[in-house]
Image (cartoon, rainbow, N blue to C red):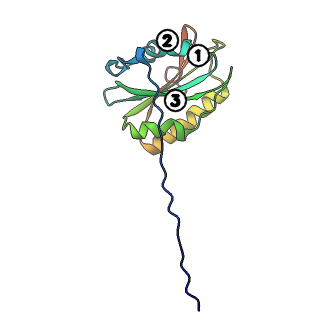
């Protein structure tokens, strides 16, 4: 029998979060979200300047104050790819009580698409598993918005 040395390679995972500063949103943590209108007014300037569809998540404290937010996906003119993993990853790290979702429709059509409804229901189910409820999902459409809670979609 020969003497053989067995070597194992250890993998070390390192994650790098990029930090994007939005100076005009430095006062967000002082803002309390009590309605979809509050959320719409708070993020309308950011969403209005987007040429394509973007999907964002805001993290809320137990008192519904915005702890932070992240743009999860930047898509093309009429779609963006959203996965529960990206939506909840930073929400877990931020130790938030709930999240509120928002995305824009550059066409300014405020009606939710079938895809919008399907991904929202999928995210609601994921939130139930993680015990991070979804406060609402708001579609930004120019000067108007649609709330999934107000429409009783979620």
The percent position of residue 141, horizontal first and vertical second, equals 58, 13
Q: Secondary structure at mark 2?
A: helix
Q: CA distance from mark 1 to mark 2?
A: 9 Å
Q: Is residue 36 left or right of residue 1?
A: left
The percent position of residue 23, horizontal first and vertical second, equals 41, 17
Question: Can I make out residue 108 in this image?
Answer: yes
Q: Which residue is mark 3?
A: 154
Q: How many marks?
A: 3
In the image, 133 versus 39, the foreground residue is 39
Q: Which residue is mark 2?
A: 45
Q: Which residue is mark 1?
A: 50
Residue 61, located in which quarter of the rendered image?
Answer: top left
Q: Is residue 67 left or right of residue 117?
A: left
Q: Residue at x 53, y 36 (%)?
A: 123
Q: Is residue 33 left or right of residue 11?
A: left
Of the numbered discs 1 and 2, the one sitting upstream in the chain is 2
Q: Residue furthest top?
A: 143
The percent position of residue 26, horizontal first and vertical second, equals 37, 18
Q: CA distance from mark 1 to mark 3?
A: 26 Å
């Amino acid at each position: 029998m020969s003497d053989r040395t067995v070597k194992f390679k250890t993998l070390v995972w390192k994650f790098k979060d990029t930090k994007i500063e939005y100076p005009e949103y430095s006062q967000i943590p002082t803002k309390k979200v009590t309605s979809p209108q509050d959320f719409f007014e708070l993020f309308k300037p950011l969403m209005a300047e987007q040429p394509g569809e973007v999907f964002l998540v805001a993290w809320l404290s137990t008192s519904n104050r915005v702890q932070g937010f992240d743009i999860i996906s930047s898509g093309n003119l009429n779609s963006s790819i959203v996965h529960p993993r990206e939506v909840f990853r930073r929400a877990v790290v931020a130790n938030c009580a709930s999240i509120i979702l928002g995305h824009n429709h550059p066409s300014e059509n405020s009606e939710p698409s079938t895809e919008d409804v399907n991904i929202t229901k999928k995210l609601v189910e994921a939130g139930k598993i993680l015990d991070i409820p979804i406060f609402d999902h708001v579609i930004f459409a120019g000067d108007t918005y649609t709330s999934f809670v107000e429409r009783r979609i979620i």
